[in-house]
Amino acid sequence: MKIYKPTTPSRRHMTVIPYREILTAKEPWKPLTTRLNSHAGRNFRGVITTRHQGGGLKKLYRLVDFRQNRFDIPAKVETIEYDPYRSAFIALIVYKDGLRSYVLAPKDIKVGDEILTSENASLKIGNRLPLQKIPVGYQVHNVEIKPGGGGRLARSAGSYAEVLAHEGRYSIIKMSSKEIRKVFSNSLATIGQVSNPDYNLVNIGKAGRSRWLGIRPTVRGTVMNPVDHPYGGGEGRQPRGTKRPKTRWGKVTGGHKTRNKKKWSSKMIVQRRPKVR
């Protein structure tokens, strides 16, 4: 982490990732980029469904290959790059037949390293193979839920899943959240941890940097008027005044379960993540 000297109030606690020491390219590979329209938290009717979004710098979306299903064709890492749409770094790889692709960069991978997707690939960081071929105790990321569906689990910066067991057509993995779940044994997974594990240590430092990221200001309910929020009003600072925490629309939150009870993958969860107290 890069820590700044406290030359100004906003610099006092500001920390950033030392990109110059890690990244090897300033510009993305243009054929693998596209422009996404900014919706600023609005739905198809233009109604705000996610608050505190909008503005921010323009950015190009990188077309990341989460499937990595080109079997038995070795690829070499050309660059390690920044991706404005995700917390992890990405790697530009070139296959032996000349095709280029973006993939999630594993931790400790370097330019020039060779990676392979194969059922018989070696247990080396960056290689991709079916879960049933990966021994117990190994860390994996970009794990498929359904074979051929592309990686869905353990994709953010520093995350990984640990292989716990193999039972018939299922493999049991432990997520970063301590949730234990079953995944089909023939689903593909990449060896290693996702890059940029220090991402959670970043301190934005000042309001302007949040605005560059497209994050708009958040107003606390307790400083609003009673008409605007259940916590509003009162002389000076007042306690919450309601039995359960609520949103500004009066909906109960804080511990309220939001997961769909009929979600098909619930039967794959062996043990839910522990409650944070």
Image (cartoon, rainbow, N blue to C red):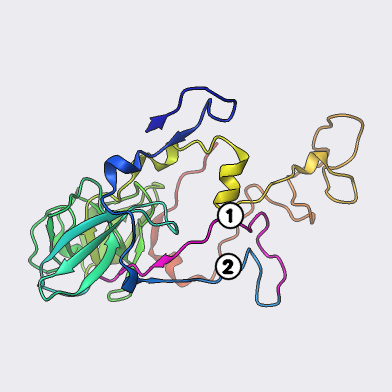
125 to 42, vertically: above or below: above
Identify the residue at horizontal 62%, vertical 57% (top origin): 55
Please name whichever residue, 25 or 111, is drawn nearer the observer in this view of the structure.
25
Q: Is residue 277 left or right of residue 167?
A: right
Mark 2 in CB contact with mark 1 (< 8 angstroms): yes
Magenta stretch holds residue 61: yes
Instruction: Determine which residue is flagged by label 2.
Output: 38
Which span is picked out in magenta?
46-68
Q: Is residue 231 left or right of residue 235?
A: left
| CA distance separating discs 2 and 1 | 10 Å
Residue 52 location, quadrant: bottom right
- What amino acid type is highlighted by mark number 1? Gly
Q: Residues within 10 Å of mark 2 (few under 14, many from 20)?
A: some
Secondary structure under tag 2 reads loop
Residue 126 location, quadrant: bottom left
Magenta stretch holds residue 167: no
Secondary structure under tag 1 reads loop
Please name whichever residue, 139 or 236, is drawn nearer the observer in this view of the structure.
236
Which of the numbered marks, if any, corresponds to residue 214?
1
Identify the residue at horizontal 92%, vertical 31% (top origin): 235
Q: Residues within 10 Å of mark 1 (few under 14, many from 20)?
A: some
